[in-house]
Image (cartoon, helix red, strand yellow):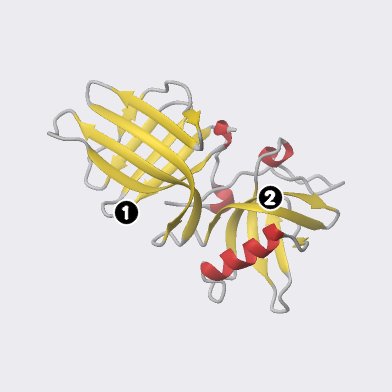
């Protein structure tokens, strides 16, 4: 799985944060630490590094950076809840972090959720056009028409779809989820029950997930 980002333009008057952040959503960008131990976040396309102010969220970012190989990686992509204060950034909570992946180039404006897992490898993309699920070895993805968003209840997001070709049930549970192959931490644990009509049984696939801007 790979990680994610979206940006808005830089104005001459001030550094603009991504649209999702302006609406109370997460801020996406690159996190780094200097040799002197000073931590920074550079919001996607904002054009300026903001020094992290001391806070529980900033200390959490330091722990996550170390866990994802901070000794080897110069920067990691992060998605955090927080806000700018002058030339500083006050981080409240880490939503997602990944060493590598698409980072700020990922467009999540029309995406509800993305998920994936390993052993066997599978991926899921749920956007405003369809839900697409694909396993390694499948000739093509199973496509389910959009039937609205996930049903939400008690920290869970659920979706069920069915076509003439396949059936699927998706549950996202709000729990930290580590994908060691992707070297990433995600906010949801994913469980997918899927089967083609030609298959004798429905199989269960487990992995991690994160939300796009269309889910907020």
Disc 1 to disc 2: CB gap under 8 Å:
no
Crowding around mark 1 (Cα neighbors within 10 Å: few <14, some 14 to 19, many 20+) is: some
Q: Residue at x 27, y 22 (%)?
A: 163
Regarding residue 101, the answer to whether it shows in the image is no
Q: Is residue 22 left or right of residue 130?
A: right
Q: CA distance from mark 1 to mark 2?
A: 32 Å
Q: Is residue 87 left or right of residue 24?
A: right
Answer left or right for 167 relative to 9: left
Depth check, front residue: 133 or 7: 133
- Residue appearing at x 22%, y 25% in the figure: 165
Q: Image quarter for residue 97?
A: bottom right
Residue wearing tag 1: 118
Q: Which mark is residue 136?
A: none
Whichever of callouts 1 and 2 sits on the residue coming sooner in the sequence is 2
Residue 216 placement: quadrant: top right
Q: Relative to the observer, which residue lies in front, 191 or 50?
A: 191
How many dots with numbers?
2
Q: Secondary structure at mark 1?
A: loop
Residue farthest along the front direction in this orientation? 154
Q: Tell me where residue 39 appears, x and y as whole percent.
A: 71, 67
Q: Residue 194: x and y, percent?
A: 26, 35
Above or below — where is 184 with respect to 71?
above
Is residue 208 in sight in this rendering? yes
Residue labelled with disc 2: 45
- Front residue of 69/61: it is 61
- Label 2 crowding class (10 Å Cα cut-off): few <14, some 14-19, many 20+? many
The correct choice, above or below, for 64 with respect to 18 in the image is below
């Amino acid at each position: 799985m790979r990680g994610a980002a979206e940006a808005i333009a830089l104005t001459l008057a001030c550094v603009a944060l991504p649209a999702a952040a302006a609406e109370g959503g997460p801020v996406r960008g690159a996190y780094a630490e200097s040799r002197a131990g000073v931590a920074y976040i550079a919001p996607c396309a904002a054009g300026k590094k903001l020094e992290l102010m001391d806070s529980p969220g900033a200390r959490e970012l330091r722990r996550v950076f170390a866990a994802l190989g901070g000794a080897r990686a110069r920067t990691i992509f992060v998605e955090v809840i927080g806000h700018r204060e002058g030339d500083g950034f006050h981080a409240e909570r880490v939503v997602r972090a990944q060493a590598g992946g698409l980072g700020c180039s990922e467009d999540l404006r029309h995406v509800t959720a993305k998920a994936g897992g390993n052993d066997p490898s599978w991926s899921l993309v749920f956007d405003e056009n369809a839900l697409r699920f694909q396993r390694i070895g499948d000739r093509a993805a199973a496509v389910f028409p959009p039937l609205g968003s996930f049903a939400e209840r008690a920290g869970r997001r659920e979706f069920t779809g069915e076509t003439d070709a396949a059936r699927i049930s998706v549950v996202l549970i709000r729990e930290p989820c580590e994908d060691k192959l992707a070297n990433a931490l995600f906010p949801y644990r994913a469980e997918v029950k899927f089967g083609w009509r030609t298959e004798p049984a429905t199989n269960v696939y487990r992995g991690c997930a994160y939300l796009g801007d269309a889910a907020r």
